[in-house]
Amino acid sequence: MFKFAVWIIFAIVIVLLPQFFTSLLSVSILNQMAIAIVFALSYNMLLGQGGMLSFGHAVYFGLGGFMAVHALLGIEDGDYFFSVTLIPLVGGLFGLLAALFIGSFSTHKAGTVFAMISLGVGELIAASSLILVSFFGGEAGVSGDRTYGPTFFGYDFAQDIQVYYLAAAWMFIATLAMYLFTQTPAGRMANAVRDNPERAEFIGYSARRVRLISFVMSGFFAGIAGGLFAVNYEILTEQNLNAVTSGNVLLMAYIGGLGFFIGPIIGAVVLTLMNSVLSHYTTLWMLYLGIMFVLTVMFLPNGLTGFLMMHRTPWHLGKIRLLIKPYIVTSIPGAVFALSLVAMVEMAHSSEAEFVFLGASFNSSGIVSWGVLIAIALGSFIALRRSLPALREAWAQANAIDSGEQK
């Protein structure tokens, strides 16, 4: 009953979101989030659920997107006659076929062998996109028009808000389908093969077949994401197939939290905001993304979702209140330290004499400005280090099970 309520709330939220974010930029960001969520969840089926590290997952996203654009062109030319609402399904089916072919030889092994094959296939397809111009369109890519063809209850998807509801509907369907897949025997066995393929083989299951099923399903949903991308942007290029796109989806899944179903959703939202919002304020946003990934690997190996899940025990014990004050005391100097470092990086990158950061004006070449920032950074770092013992003690108390509770 609880899980059913969660899905109802999820549906209500995605329906009401455009009512709170009404600007064109906000709707565009919501569209990007919907696409990124489906793409990241499809990657989690590989790595998080199946233990297959892929460096070429953009292949199925891109191939599905290119086929979707060609379907748009077919509708525009009158060769096909079906609604644009089915375009993501076209991308999904083509992604499935591509995954079935590639998976037939790449899923024999997991680990390093699979990762290297995925990298080689990704580079091969990306290079082919500049050679097979008739399908991939060369450097210019392939573009279409989503407004052609029959309307869907009077909607021709000329406006971004209409595209959002289309993307949100497909996102909900794909998210629910991927969750249900994790509850099937095939999904459960994918976890078993990820954890111990030898034991899975011993009890009679083919590890390769289980990996192939997960691989094909992952390609299908990645293709759906590519189809949604084609409908939203109406153009596909080589960039949608290359290693950068594959790296982005890996970052989404890892930062959000591998192994947790909601993890890639959080990662997709965070990275989309960094890409769409933070990039408007600084050209160094990729640097901060890289730093965020490194810090996640070092201190939060289970991602942001894993960090949230660490608080289940204090929550069930009713001791979560013990962490509020230590978190505040630690987060304030931590935030000041991080902002002071960002200010120094941005000031070093700035080409203007006067540098403005959070309303404060600094002289980029002035010793006093640099001295002030360095002093703030050192002071906040010392305060941060001194607050950590109290935080560790509070964490131990919040997770301690009293003798009465044990009984």
Image (spheres, rainbow, N blue to C red):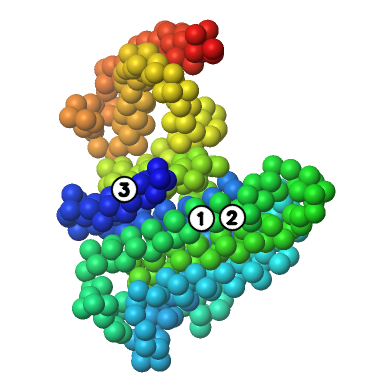
Q: Nearer the viewer, residue 185 or 22?
A: 185
Q: Type of residue at label 3?
A: Ile
**107 over 380 or under it: above or below:** below
Q: Nearer the viewer, residue 292 or 183?
A: 183
Looking at the rendered structure, the secondary structure element under dot 3 is helix
The residue tagged 3 is 9
Q: Position of residue 329 (x, y in %)?
A: 33, 13
> Which tag, 2 or 3, sits closer to the chain's start?
3
Q: Is the residue under label 1 in contact with that under label 2 (CB below 8 Å)?
A: yes
The residue tagged 2 is 184
Q: Residues within 10 Å of mark 2 (few under 14, many from 20)?
A: few
The residue tagged 1 is 180
The structure residue drawn at horizontal position 62% and vertical position 60%, both measured from the top left corner, is 215
The structure residue drawn at horizontal position 29% and vertical position 84%, both measured from the top left corner, is 150
Q: Is the residue under label 1 in contact with that under label 3 (CB below 8 Å)?
A: no
> Which tag, 3 or 1, sits closer to the chain's start?
3
Of all residues, the one furthest to the front in this rendering is 407
**106 over 134 or under it: above or below:** above
Q: Type of residue at label 2?
A: Thr
Q: Nearer the viewer, residue 143 or 99?
A: 99
Q: CA distance from mark 2 to mark 3?
A: 23 Å
Looking at the rendered structure, the secondary structure element under dot 2 is loop
